Amino acid sequence: MLCRDVAAGGRVREAIRAVAPGADIHVRSCDLGRLASVRDCAAAVRGDFESIALLINNAGRVSTRQRLSEDGFELTFATNHLGPFLLTELLRDRMSAAGRIITVASRAHYRGSLDLQRIEAPRGRYSPTAAYAQSKLANVLHTFALARRLAGSSVTANCLHPGIVATNLLPRWLRLLKPLVTRATFGPERGARTTLHLALSGEAAQVSGRYFDEHQSVQAAAPTANDVALQEALWTASERWTQVNA
């Protein structure tokens, strides 16, 4: 478990152990909004594990006001895209045979747009919903570009919309994002179904480069998300922004 709040992660670990006493759970510090933290976490994971069967990029945020990460990027984009991009690249060579990389995106990506020049030089009025939709579009673009790079291997990459999940974060997130997504809300168990389907089902083992909805069904992603030139431009820019090859 890679967690920004290690103490909260520890409490979840103990809750899991209460129902699965044999579970071997490690909690590592990882703030996806800080590239240095992502690098430190990836190094710790590489030190602990020779191979990784599943990598689930699940964490996300929406900032209600314009804020920059310590690396100088809009915080929602930094946390939701740049952090997972860097983490995935730093661990990709440790994925085991038939490994699966899963990214929790959102139906909000349908309303997203992406101007790479504005990522480096933000301008105009800040909109939390637009920033979130942009970051979720980046998730889908990244997944599709990653799947191409994994073609010919047994490792898969997919992304999904989980639905609006009724957790402790719901009041703020729902107010901002509900108009972008859906009127329905799910409990955490139902909200995890598509993630678990992609992680564990035999049906999903041979599927890669797809976007799934909250009902575990493949759906067509937004036309912008299927723009191969934009996928590649984002990939190249993300390599530069994260200095992943430095």
Image (tube, helix red, strand yellow):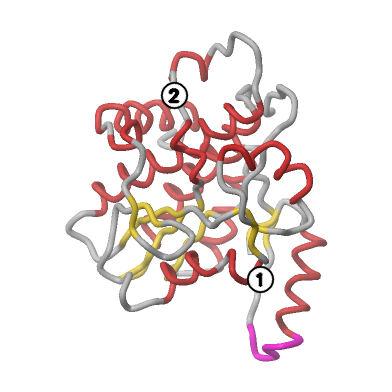
Q: Is residue 169 above or below residue 27?
A: above
Q: What residue appears at the point 55 percent right and 53 percent down from the top-left corner?
A: 42
- 58 left or right of 221? right
Q: How far apart, in angstroms, are the residues tagged by discs 1 and 2?
A: 36 Å
In the figure, 146 relative to 52: above or below?
above
Specify whether 49 is left or right of 129: left
Query: Quarter holding the N terminus?
Result: bottom right
The residue range painted magenta reads 18-23
In which quadrant of the rendered view does residue 34 lie? top right
Mark 1 Cα shell of 10 Å, populated few (<14), some (14-19), many (≥20): few
- Pick the front one: 28 or 82: 82
Query: Who comes first in sequence, dot 1 or dot 2?
Result: 1
Q: Residue furthest front?
A: 183
Q: Residues within 10 Å of mark 2 (few under 14, many from 20)?
A: some
Residue 127 occupies quadrant = top right
Image x and y of residue 194, in percent: 48, 65
Is 177 drawn above or below residue 57 in the view shown? above
Q: Quadrant of the C terminus?
A: top left
Can residue 51 be seen in the rendering of this structure? no
Indicate which disc residue 114 carries: 2
**Extreme-bottom residue of the structure:** 21
* Mark 1 or 2, closer to the camera: 2
Q: Give the left or right position of residue 51, taking residue 226 as reference.
A: right
Query: How far across and how far down the image is residue 145, in percent?
Result: 30, 42
- Return the residue at label 1: 26
- Residue 11 has which mark? none
Name the residue type under label 2. Leu
Q: Nearer the viewer, residue 81 or 114?
A: 114
Q: Amino acid at mark 1?
A: His
